[in-house]
Amino acid sequence: MEKEKNSGLLNDCRTVDGYNPYEKAVWLDCDDGQKPYLCVNERIEWYTRYCESFGLCAGITTEFVPELTKQGMITMKTTIILGNDTYTGYGSKLVDAAEGYSGDDIECAETRAVGRALRNAGFGSPFDDNEDNP
């Protein structure tokens, strides 16, 4: 895989010929300058291409976690299958307790959970430095 001058971040991550996630990153302003961030949809693309390239069993499942959902917050769990391994991520969303939660709240918590599970599986980690994302 040919790498860009600034793509040293890819040295220790899951590479796929013809796909450079660094090129898909957006730049976020931080207290100490800018840092790249890979959106969840691009993490899914990277994961899919990686699994296809290496013929790995793949899958993404999400589920509502009632025991972690409290009044004012909804929690979702995502499990990523990568070959014989599984990776998990959780995501929550604060909601208006009086209104309850909506489909948008579920989608937001689910997206966070998917992003974290993919990061745990190695898709996004060069960008995250093991931090939660905005």
Image (cartoon, rainbow, N blue to C red):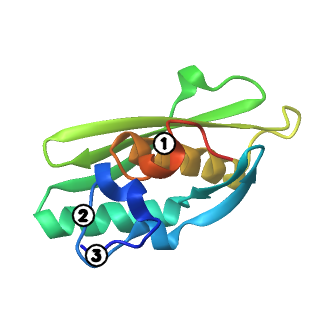
Residue ID for mark 2: 50
Which of the marked residues, 3 or 1, is nearer the chain's N terminus? 3
Distance of label 3 from label 1 (alpha carbons): 27 Å
Q: Residue furthest front?
A: 5
The image's mark for residue 38 is none
Q: Residue furthest right?
A: 98
Which residue is denoted by mark 3 in the rendering? 2
Circles 1 and 2, Cβ within 8 Å, touching? The answer is no
Q: Of discs 2 and 3, which sits in the foreground? A: 3
Residue 56 place in picture, x, y as percent: 14, 57
Q: Position of residue 122 (x, y in %)?
A: 34, 46
Q: Which residue is mark 1?
A: 116
Closest to the observer: 32 or 16?
32
Indicate left or right for 89 with 105 as reference: left
N-term mark: 2 or 3? 3
Q: Which picture quadrant has residue 87?
A: top left
As shown in the figure, which amino acid type bears the numbered disc 3?
Glu
